[in-house]
Amino acid sequence: MTEKTIQVFINGKKKSFSENNTLVSLLNILEIDGNGIAIEVNLVVIPKSQYKNIIIKNDDKIEIVQFIGGG
């Protein structure tokens, strides 16, 4: 049985992933540290405590914002 591929938009760019990835696994695939970021899925800001529970779906629009300190 082959794994199904889904298309999602991350920060406006179309990307392909296998089905059943959570936001945590997506961050790992993209090599993004989960600290200092915020994630929005389909215009809803997701609490960090829910990253492991949210499974990305075909055509999801995901925005990942990294906080940068400075003065």
Image: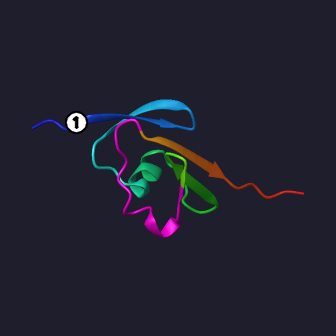
**Left or right: 71, with 39 as reference point:** right
Quarter of the C terminus within the rendering: bottom right
Q: Which residue is depicted at the point 42% across and 46% down?
A: 29
In percent of width and height, residue 8 lies at: 42, 36
Name the residue that disc number 1 marks.
4
- Examine the rendered structure and indicate whether residue 2 appears above or below residue 65: above
Magenta span: predominant SS is loop
- Residue furthest top in the image: 14
Q: Nearer the viewer, residue 45 or 37?
A: 45
Residue 69, image quadrant = bottom right
- Residue furthest left in the image: 1
Residue 17, image quadrant = top left
In percent of width and height, residue 56 lies at: 37, 48
Q: Nearer the viewer, residue 27 or 14?
A: 14
Residue range of the region highlighted in magenta in the rendering = 45-59
In percent of width and height, residue 36 lies at: 64, 61
- Residue furthest front in the image: 43
